[in-house]
Every structure is written in C-alpha cells, then in structure tokens.
Amino acid sequence: MTSPKEYPTLPRENTLAQLPPEYPTDAQGQISQILSTSSLNRLVVLDDDPTGTQTCHDISVLAVWDVQTLVEEFQSNSRGFFILTNSRALPPVGAEKLIRGICANVAQAAKATGQTVDIVLRGDSTLRGHFPLEADVAQSVFGEVDAWVLAPFFFQGGRFTIDDVHYVVEGDQLVPAGSTQFAKDATFGYKSSSLRDYVMEKAPGRFASDQLHSVTIDEIRKGGPEAVFEKLMGLPQGGVLIVNAAAESDMHVFVAGLLLAEARGKHYLYRTGAAFVSTRLGIRSKAPITATELKLPNPRETGGLIIAGSYVPKTTAQLKVLTDRRGGTGELAIIEMKVDDLIASPDSATKVIQQVVEETESYLQAGKDTLVMTSRKLITGGDELSSLAIGSNVAEALVRVLQLIRVRPRYVIAKGGITSSDAATKGLNVKRAMIVGQAAPGVPLWRCDEPTSRHQGVPFVVFPGNVGGESTLCELVQGWY
C-alpha cells in the first residue's frame, strides 16, 4: 500500500467540545434489558494479555483452557468469561497454534453444554498485537461471520476514535496513534492512524476499500441505538466495521444497537479494547477498591511486592515518581535487575535472580514495600523475533523471582502486560481468578482463592504498562500502605 496519510495532533478539549452532544438516554439500561430478555450467545474473551480485564468486575478469568475447565465455566450462570492467552508474548507461529487450540477447546465445550458463543479478541487499545492473524484463526474454527468489529476505544486509557482516526491522549492533546511510541513497537509496530489504513496495512490485499465500514460519532449521538442497528442490518457481509467513540456513552449506544442486531441473528467477530467487553457484558463501572475494602492486615505483617518489567515510557515515568517519593523516605526498598546481566548467560541470570530473591524476602519480612524492577535501558535484538526473545528472557527472570519468594506479600502489583500475565500464571500458579474490580481507573484487581495457587487470596494487581498518570502507581502504593 502507499504510505498512510498523516494526521495532525489535536487539542483535546476543543476537539471533543466540537463533537455533537452525547446521546441523552442511558443506553446501559437498554443493554441490561436486552441481555435479560434475549437468548444471546455466551461471550468468550480471548485476552492477549491480562490488562483486558481493566473495566470489569465479578467475572472470572481462566489461565487454563482444558475442555473440562471450560465446560464448568459454561455451566456457570455468567454472561461470559475471559481466557488469558498472553499471545502478545509469542511469535506469530506460536500465537496461531495457541489460539487455534483454545478455540477448538471452546468449540468442543460449547457443543457439550449446548451453547453458542461469540468470540472477542481483546487486544491492545494502542493497536499492538497479532492482527489479523488471531481473527483469521478464530474464524477458521467458528465459521464465517457477518463482519469483523474493530473497536479499540478505551476511555480510561485515553484512546479515542474520531472520524475513523485512532488517537492517544498525551497531556492535553490527542496524538494520532501512528505518531506515538506505541506505533514504533519493536515487535508490533505500524504506521497508520486511520483504522481504515491500519486494516489495509496489517492485512494487505485482503479487503477492498468498500469492505471497510464505520459507525460514526454523529450516527451514535444523533441516532442512538436504532441508528446503529439500522447501520448494522444494512452492511454487506464479510467486511470490517470500525467503531468511533470519544466517550463511554458512545460505546454504550453502539453495543445497545449491536445487541438488537445480534437478537435478529447477526453474528460478529470482535477485535476490541477493554471498554467493549464490559459494555457487552452489561457490567457497569464502580469506584476503585480501597485498602480498607480489601481488609489488608493492620498493622502490616509483611511488605507489598511490586514487580516491573514494562518498558513503555509511561511505566518508566511512573517508576521514577514512585522511587523518588517513597524510596527517599525509606518506605520503599528498590531492587534493580540489570538486563545485561540477565541475558549475558544462564549462570549470570541465576546468580542475579538468587541475590534478588534473598534481598526481597528480607525486605518483605521486615514489613517494607519492595520494588523489583528491570533496568530501564531498553535492549532490543536485530529483528522483531530476537527483540521478543529478549523480552521473554527478562519476563522469565521476574517470574523466577516470584516463584522463589517464600514470604507471603501483603499484595502483589505486576507492572506491564506480559509481566503481569507471567506473574499470575507462572509465578503464582493462578488457573482461575475472580476479577474483583479496579485498584485504580483502568487497573484490574484479581483475587485467586484456589488452594493450588501460591500466596492464596493475596490481592493481585494487573497494572498495564501504558495506563494512568505519572503518579498513579505511587498513589496506589501509598494508599495501600
């Protein structure tokens, strides 16, 4: 394709103020009514890292997907559930094999329980991930759909789609996604800001321009769910539908119209951010959970553990605020794992890990909150796969630290998508967890009470690498002190 069109950075307040007023009726009420009165498919959310749970509560997330576990989940009375695939940490061949295996098991479990499913491929709201590969694999297992729905909007993370262009909030500006650091990702980089261009860039030759459709903010805000329904019913089969949204109510209106179409027999495959999932499940937002609500031991018995492996600039800025404010007061112990030493040799990595474990246990036992972080200089390989391999080695070292720590932490905060996934599944041996809610806006809080999990019942915070302000991590640690 030709070079994608470039779009200017826009002033946030003025741009949003020029949009039509939000739809005046609360569409969430309509969503709840449709969900309770219509026989709709069960929603199965394949999450390519655990941060997709960031707008949900009181719903389960599975880290295993054997048929028996899936059958048990289908037999529960929930409207849907998450499966943590962590496929963003895998190269394409590995991701394809994984998603195919999961989809085959889901299909088998659904058939055994007499249910039908809709598949959501929950991906990064800044467009990184295996697209269109995962959608192709899911469709090959479950069959053709009326359209793929592309909806990366995520309000809490400042991801808006306006006139089919996807924006990331930076300060008081809306920056086109293709101009952000996310687009320069060593593994999943891209150039397009327009979602139409993005589809063409990632799936060259697959779609003609007249197969790319969108629901506009004008249609959502002026016409409401009925306008969305009419738009969906009139689409030719087999294309991609882009969802524009700049407020949570926009997603509510879209989903209300979508459910009307689903009730008429329409069937879609979804590639979305977190906002779509909670809205489609009828989950209303609630305030972040406090230390008092968690009933953390007071006085404290051990320190909290924060592990950080994410390299996005926002994480590095958040870690700086945390270490500056709490490290200097003596309330936070800081342990840095040098990436050069971790990737130098297996013996070097083993030595570093053992030393970090001993220090961490000592601090936690003394009741001190402890940050274990990788050195902040990003080391990449010569190509996408070697960069992914380096990232995997670093994530493996952080997991090994968590596996070896015998002291039960007050809580665990894992910073970064791949880091938190590996921390949950490999470090804490989580197989099924309940999403309790959020520790901060857009920051999921899980609890695992399975007897097979390590540190059973300890609050586990899945802190996305690119969510929150610079002080959000520090404020969370401070609030749970």
Image (spheres, rainbow, N blue to C red):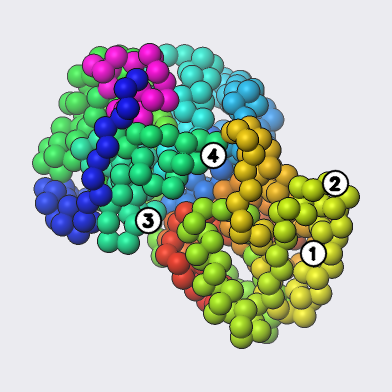
Q: Nearer the viewer, mark 2 or mark 3?
A: 2
Pointer 4 or 1: first along the chain:
4
The residue carrying pointer 4 sits among few (fewer than 14), some (14 to 19) or many (20 or more) residues within 10 Å by Cα, namely: some
Question: 457 above or below 116?
Answer: below
Q: Nearer the viewer, mark 3 or mark 1?
A: 1
Pointer 2 or 4: first along the chain:
4
Q: Quadrant of the N terminus?
A: top left
Q: Nearer the viewer, mark 1 or mark 2?
A: 2
Q: Check disc 2 and report the residue beneath it.
A: 346
Q: Check disc 4 and report the residue beneath it.
A: 186
Q: Check disc 3 and report the residue beneath it.
A: 156
The residue carrying pointer 1 sits among few (fewer than 14), some (14 to 19) or many (20 or more) residues within 10 Å by Cα, namely: many
Q: Identify the element where label 3 is drawn.
A: helix
The residue carrying pointer 3 sits among few (fewer than 14), some (14 to 19) or many (20 or more) residues within 10 Å by Cα, namely: some
Question: 16 above or below 72?
Answer: below
Q: Identify the element where label 1 is drawn.
A: helix
Disc 1 versus disc 2: distance between alpha carbons? 15 Å
For badge 1, the amino acid type reads Val
| Residue 199 is covered by the magenta coloring | yes
Pointer 2 or 3: first along the chain:
3
Give the residues in magenta.
195-212
For badge 2, the amino acid type reads Pro
Q: Give percent across and percent down for residue 392.
A: 69, 42
